[in-house]
Image: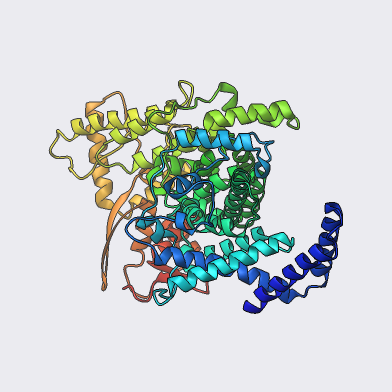
Amino acid sequence: MTHFIQLVNNIYEQIQTGLSIDLSVASNDLKQFVKETTTDIINKSASFHFYDAQKLCYQTLLQDIDMMFTLKLSTVVSFAHLFAPNFKYQGKDLERRCRLILDTDLPKITDIFNLGNEFLDNATRKTMLDDEQFDLTLKDVELWTIRQENNKHVDIEHLQSNIERIQGLCKKLNALSLAPNWISILKDIMDERLRAKEWEEEYSLSLVKVQLKWLHAIVLPWISHIMSRSNNEDVDWYDFLRLKLRAEHVLYESIYQYRIRNILDTILDIPETNDAILDLKITVDKRGYLDDLEKKLLQEIKNRLLQLSVSTTSILEYYAACVQCLRQIDPSCKILLTVTDTIKKYIREYRKDVAQGVVTIIRNPENYDIQLRGNDDEPYVFAIDELSNEKAQKEKIPDREHMLEKLEKLKAKSSDMTALLISMCRSAKDFVTAYGDRLGEILLKTKDYDTEEEILRLEIIKMNFPPDMFIRCDIMLKDVAESKRIDKMIHENEAIDSSFRSLIVSRKYWPGNNDSGDSDESEDNDDIHNIMEYWPHQKRLMKDYMAEYGRKKASRRLKFLPSLGTVSIELEFQSGRQELEVQPEAAVIISLYEQEGIALTKDDIATRLGIKKKVVVECMNFWTQKGILELMADGRYQLLSNLK
């Protein structure tokens, strides 16, 4: 570096001497022409070593300033002493002005990097009035510091001398028009900082907030040393403010590129990544990168999310997280509309369990870290024409007016996650049907007739729909309440076994109960009869219960549907016991394996028990998933080798 500084000094002296002697009587225009021509020749003939040395000098100056800041650091954090001399402002006043953000709420057509002096003055005054700025603290310094070797052995006077030496070099390079592109140098430095292990996979910290403080305390003094100066402190100050804005936008650019690489994971991990989302919001706003964010987010969604290997529930979970994030980044909902349409088109075309997935998330939002609706948010109520997809099928290619209508509707829904998720179904009626099916499954497994939680959950869902959309659910809940009353009445007879209870269901409203007649000779009743033959004791209890019901309700009779209920079983192995709630068919099937060495195919089981093969398949899948049975190469099922 010493040789480079000497080279620049020689060039500077020769040009200055030549201009003062050879062209002493020439006009200023001619002198400027000669100077520019000479500089152009140097630029064209200089080797890459010359430019590498330029870059090294500027990087060294920044490192020296950073080191000087660290060596002079005390309990009070100050950085005004790092600036080049003869600045318009000094001390705390300079520090405060350096930390002001001047490009807030600017019109989109504004040329940020060429703001006029009057505008800079007005922005400074307004920001100083609005800004509740606090002094930098040691905690701030700790956050932005990258761990390096101890610098205490460095002599401060030598460091200061080196800073002044490089500052002199920068002044001569500016005079010769040979100064390097400091923005490119700063961008490389910024990118390198973000690759440091301190920021690796760091999502719980706003890099913009941390790195802006570093930039104001370290980079701005560096700029004061390398910038071209005049003899007018006002001109120099306005030039400095414009360079400050450029430096801040270099930082925004680097942080945006750093954050956008992991956009999919950042969104999925919300709320732990709220600070990373804040970084994206700030940098997108500052750099005008909404379109770029939309493009890269959609690319990630298509490449990694909309794949057959990803479950429907996982896709919907990500969509909900996406809504939370994009509402912060883009309140206009423009990106959210594109993301919604992309995901909706995919799942409606390739997934048949969308409504079931939506029901799962809405019933248990806490399992997915999703807030369905804020306490102060009004629920979105679906209009009548939104309840089916007939209108959507009739629509032609959307025009601009239609797109604006969709955007306004999406904005209205954006604060109601329940409505947004329901909108992903093929129609709102599909959701109502799926919700009724799931509610029925839950109620069928309820043993104590407690429906208070389900009633509350249903009433919240009803807020999004016109009246009378959930009549089926109301009937099922009413059935449970009525069953509780009747069961209590029947058990007034102490001869009825207290462990045997029933749920009396209304025909056609409950899942799995769609028979249209009263015949006991249906195929389903054959299955039921076959199952109950394996439980003679339960069959006797059933008859006792039916007889008592006939005495209490002489005008009615019960038709038992055991396949709709559940059975509590206990499996005992050498390794321990397992208690399970299972379908009656599953209980009968596992009882076939009480003896060792049993291996049966699905057809064997269906024939032996006289039940449908489809039911057998469902039950065998259940037992293999539970790790009780295993499928062998010849198609037979047996107990796992470690279970006896």
Name the spot of residue 153 as percent of width and height, x first.
40, 77
Name the spot of residue 105 as percent of width and height, x first.
57, 35
**Can residue 615 be seen from the camera position used here?**
no
Q: How is the image coloured?
A: rainbow
Task: Tell me the residue at 33%/73% (across/down).
Answer: 643
- Above or below, comparing residue 617 to residue 560 in the picture: below
Name the residue nearer the viewer: 304 or 540: 304
Q: Image quadrant for the C terminus?
A: bottom left
Name the spot of residue 329 as percent of width and height, x first.
55, 42
Compared across the picture, whether 514 is left or right of 182 comes to: left
Compared across the picture, whether 307 is left or right of 144 comes to: right
- Above or below, comparing residue 633 to residue 132 in the picture: below
Compared across the picture, whether 21 is left or right of 232 comes to: right
Task: Tell me the residue at 39%/74% (across/down).
Answer: 152
Task: Tell me the residue at 32%/33% (across/down).
Answer: 504
Name the spot of residue 578 as percent of width and height, x first.
28, 62
The residue furthest left is 494
Compared across the picture, whether 181 is left or right of 411 comes to: right
Q: Image quadrant for the N terminus?
A: bottom right
**Can residue 340 be seen from the camera position used here?**
yes
Name the residue nearer the viewer: 619 or 318: 318
Q: Choose top left, top right, bottom left or bottom right for residue 479.
A: top left
Mark count: 0
- Above or below, comparing residue 10 to residue 479 in the picture: below
